[in-house]
Amino acid sequence: MNHGNLAPGPGVLVIGAGVSGLTSALELRRAGFPVTVLAERFGAGTTSVVAGALWEWPPAVCGSHQDVRSLERSKQWCRTSYAIFSELAANPATGVFLRHVNFYFRQPLAGQPGATRKMNEVRPEVRDFRHDAALIAENGIDPRAGVVDAYRYLAPMIDTDAYLQWLLGEIRRAGCRLVTRRLTGPLAEQTAGLQAEFGAELVVNCSGLGARELAGDDVWPLRGALVRVLNDGAGSPRINEAHCVSHEEGSSEPYFMFIVPRGERMLLLGGMAEENQWSLDIDLDNYAPLRAMLQRCRDFLPDLGNLRLDPAEPVRVGLRPVRRQNVRLEHEAATGLLHNYGHGGSGVTFSWGCAREVAARARALLPVGEYPAVAA
Ligand SMILES: Cc1cc2nc3c(=O)[nH]c(=O)nc-3n(C[C@H](O)[C@H](O)[C@H](O)COP(=O)(O)OP(=O)(O)OC[C@H]3O[C@@H](n4cnc5c(N)ncnc54)[C@H](O)[C@@H]3O)c2cc1C
């Protein structure tokens, strides 16, 4: 790959190095822009590394999103990401796997218009779709779990430790510049200074929950935690599929069922979605709801009974960046900023779709010129 032929065109500064920032940076670079990524944290230490990370058709199992327009927009992002993750799954270095995910229901789908609509929407978008209540017994779900209907399909599941490292490697390989720094206060007041410092015509805000401060927006945390158990086949058969029951609409309980293989040797057990909880300091010793969540998973899928906790890191906790109107992907003419934040519980799922849109908007916004594309 030759970056030397790049025209000294307008640069782009991306704020944030979670999955939104890194994927946006890569797509911008591949579109030919010189790119700098500035973040307080790269990869590890971001919310993105905590994610499950299961590709899901919206709304995700962690809770319904409210804004209908944004929900419609996000379907195209999902479609784009499904295609790209499916290709990436062919390369083991990416940490992306294509596996079956099973969704279970406490009432027959025929009597649930919302869930049936979602099923009918996702069916043509995915591979190996099957709607069959027999999946419940086939998969060894405890009959006392109270589920009566099910469907499954092939979905990307991403080991975010490996994946974020892979993304960082691609970004470095493509010649992006990385700067570790924490910004404070409104971004709009610093845009001119940042543009001058980094030779950037455009600043792309991918700061996740940080947008609360940087964009002065009402972004709040939806705390999640995943228990990590060893899924290496020692002692118990390996669990190779995901098993989920959605958060029930209207329920005040912030819990749902989320059992998702991660990489080759780990299984994640959840889930939890606690509004406006900021503390990351919860574990199986100090927080009873986490122990109850683990027990619910074991009751649901008895095969989990013998899987041992990961001694190195039994629990990982993170704050989903939630916004009432869901994702903000828009150019703010007054400030010159292009925002891409507020992905809630779907940031990995939306990442490639959003990043493609960011790159397309940058091409439309920046002075007309030839941007030599960089090979994928
Ligand atoms: C338990 C849990 C399970 C999840 N499961 C899934 C799932 O199955 N599928 C799915 O698609 N999604 C899932 N998610 C959601 C997903 O993790 C998020 O939507 C996604 O990580 C958001 O990515 P981001 O890049 O926008 O934000 P982040 O990963 O939070 O990155 C933000 C970046 O901005 C930087 N930043 C912030 N403020 C500043 C500042 N002031 N100055 C400099 N830099 C700053 C940070 O350092 C970081 O680099 C889950 C989340 C959790 C917590």
Image (cartoon, rainbow, N blue to C red):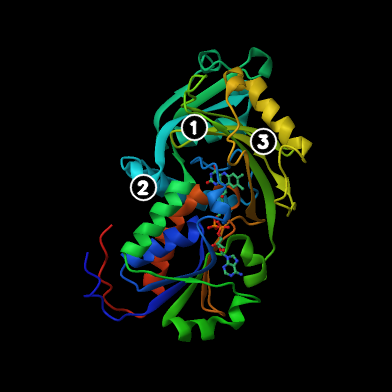
Which is more toward the observer, 265 or 351? 265
Q: Which residue is mark 3?
A: 247
Q: Position of residue 358 (x, y in %)?
A: 44, 64
Q: Give the alpha-carbon distance from disc 3 to disc 2, as whole Å.
A: 27 Å
Vertical comparison of 281 with 196: above or below: above
Type of residue at label 2?
Answer: Ile
Type of residue at label 3?
Answer: His
Type of residue at label 1?
Answer: Asn
Q: Nearer the viewer, mark 2 or mark 1?
A: 2
How many marks the image carries: the answer is 3
Q: Position of residue 223 (x, y in %)?
A: 68, 48
> In the rendered view of the protein, which quadrant contains the N terminus?
bottom left
- SS for callout 3: loop
Answer with mark 2 or mark 1, whichever residue precedes in sequence: 2
Q: Position of residue 330 (x, y in %)?
A: 52, 66
- SS for callout 1: helix
Q: Residue at x 44, y 32 (%)?
A: 123
Q: Position of residue 262 (x, y in %)?
A: 49, 37
Q: Whereabouts is ligand 1, in terms of quadrant?
A: bottom right
Relative horizontal placement of residue 376, taking residue 363 as reference (left or right): left
Q: How would you rate the neighbour count of disc 2 (Cα within 10 Å): few for under 14, some for 14-19, many for 20 or more?
A: some
Q: How would you rate the neighbour count of disc 1 (Cα within 10 Å): few for under 14, some for 14-19, many for 20 or more?
A: few
Q: Residue at x 67, y 35 (%)?
A: 247
Tag 3–tag 2 contact (CB < 8 Å): no
Q: Which residue is mark 2?
A: 84
Numbered circle sitting on residue 120? 1
Relative horizontal placement of residue 373, taking residue 61 as reference (left or right): left
Is the residue indicated by label 1 positioned so its CB lies within 8 Å of ligand 1?
A: no
